[in-house]
Amino acid sequence: MLAATETYPLLEVFWTILIFMGFFIWIWLLFVVFGDVFRRSDIGGWGKAGWIIFVIILPYLGVFVYLIAEHKGMTERQIKDAKAAQSQMDAYVREVAGGGSDPTQQIAKADELLKAGTITQDEFDAIKRKALA
């Protein structure tokens, strides 16, 4: 066991871990950059292909140039996507939490439509049957 330690000193272990982490971070940045490039709608296919080729041919430089050149656009796109996801989640929660699923609310709304003349008595009865079913 001691012989294995002498052939692979502690500083080389740290160096190996550092190299591995650098490679892992670069792979993560590739996913971020590729995801942002393909999500963009402001550039066409040739622009996307150009960025992908640049990132593949000059790996570290390509990733860093993209992050420097497009940092503001990336932030805006991420904020827009987060807001869209939040609004979808809010709409889903409202729908599931009772946005119209309560029979009394459905009948009351149908009654308002009947009084306003928007629906007929037969349509009101159908909505009432469906709500109570």
Image: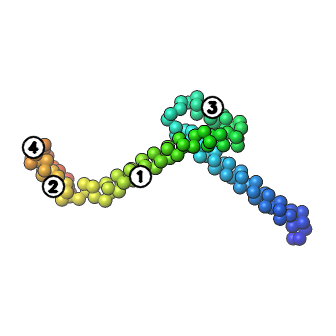
Residue shown at the point (90%, 66%) measured from the top left: 6
Dot 2 and dot 4 residues touching (CB under 8 Å): no
Numbered badge on residue 117: 4
- Mark 2, Cα crowd under 10 Å, few <14 / some 14-19 / many 20+, is few
Amino acid type shown at disc 2: Ala
Q: Are marks 3 and 2 in contact (CB under 8 Å)?
A: no
Q: Which label belongs to residue 108?
A: 2
CA gap between label 3 and label 1 equals 32 Å
Considering only order in the chain, which callout, 4 or 3, is on the residue closer to the N terminus? 3
Q: Which mark is residue 50?
A: 3
Q: Upstream in the sequence, badge 2 or badge 4?
A: 2
The answer to which of 41 and 92 lies nearer the viewer is 41
Pointer 3 and pointer 4: residues touching (CB < 8 Å)?
Answer: no
User: Given this view, does label 3 or label 2 mark the residue nearer the observer?
Assistant: 3
Q: Which amino acid is tagged 1?
A: Gln
Q: Nearer the viewer, mark 1 or mark 2?
A: 1
> Which amino acid does the dot numbered 3 rest on?
Gly
Residue 111 percent location from the top left of the image:
12, 52
- Viewer-proximal residue, 1 or 34? 34
Q: Residue furthest top?
A: 46
